[in-house]
Amino acid sequence: MRYRSLQSIVPILSLVILASSSLRAEPIQPILAGVDFNFCYSAVGYDASDQTLSGAGSAAAITLEPVLGGATYPVFNLSGSLGGALALRAKFDHVGGNADIDGVFATLGTADADLTLTGKIPGLGIQPDNVYSGTLLEADVIRLELYGDAGARTFAFNGYLRVTGGDLVIADYLGENDVIGMVSWLSSLSPTLPTGFDFASDFGATTHLGEIGAVPEPASLVLTALGSAAALLARNRLRRKRR
């Protein structure tokens, strides 16, 4: 009887742990698990007029894992040069820090499309025609964070975005409303990141390196855990009734 009781409690405990871990007040650190773009911005700037951080760079390659067994396909811009055109817009507010970092700035996105990747992937047959538009990916920010230690000149810039459309959705490599993650670094910032950091005066030209790729959605994981817990509890009740 005690074993069966523990069997009933374990899925509930797992759900509580999973849900609470997704709510912990720590910097975002996505784990990429699927379609993966490597990218590099040559510069990122801050527009004081609308308080947005923006930049345009290139996505050099797409890695489809595990969809196509880890194969890598180059991304080209619409003129045929290597590297799709990647554009990002984000508006930030200071949200505090913790024992490990001196500053955290977060955004929930802008009124426009927050991230757009334009280009083609000839190796997958994805290029402008009657089906594909040349916009490979569009996504809106769920949450992006810029954080790091005061005195440093390189800071983490990570977060989650939700896919809203693009040729990769049409080709079924990504789905509309899929959650994707950004794992990246901004370098050459002025070394004044803590609470006094002012984007207008402290933010300078930077290099932005990183990856964007598919991730499991935290909310989906909680819902999956809830469904699994409910199903297991139902099975346990049915077994007890049959005994």
Image (spheres, rainbow, N blue to C red):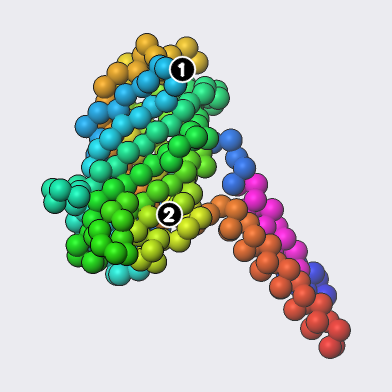
Where is residue 223? Give x, y as percent.
64, 60
At horizontal 28% and vertical 35% (from top left) the residue drawn is 56
At horizontal 22% and vertical 32% (from top left) the residue drawn is 42
Please, is residue 38 above or below residue 98 in the view? below
Please, is residue 149 above or below residue 158 in the view? above
Where is residue 140? Give x, y as percent.
47, 43
- Nearest the eye: 141 or 105: 141
Report the predominant secondary structure element of the magenta stretch. Answer: helix
Dot 1 amino acid type = Pro
Please, is residue 158 above or below residue 186 in the view? below
| Left or right: where 71 falls relative to 143 | left
Question: How far is the residue under mark 1 from the one under mark 2?
Answer: 36 Å
Q: Residue 165 carries which label?
A: 2
Where is residue 73? Give x, y as percent.
21, 60
Circle 1: element type: loop
Residue stretch in magenta: 8-21
The quadrant the N terminus occupies is: bottom right
Q: Mark 1 points at which residue?
A: 194
Looking at this rendering, what residue extends furthest in the bottom direction? 242
- Nearest the eye: 195 or 20: 195
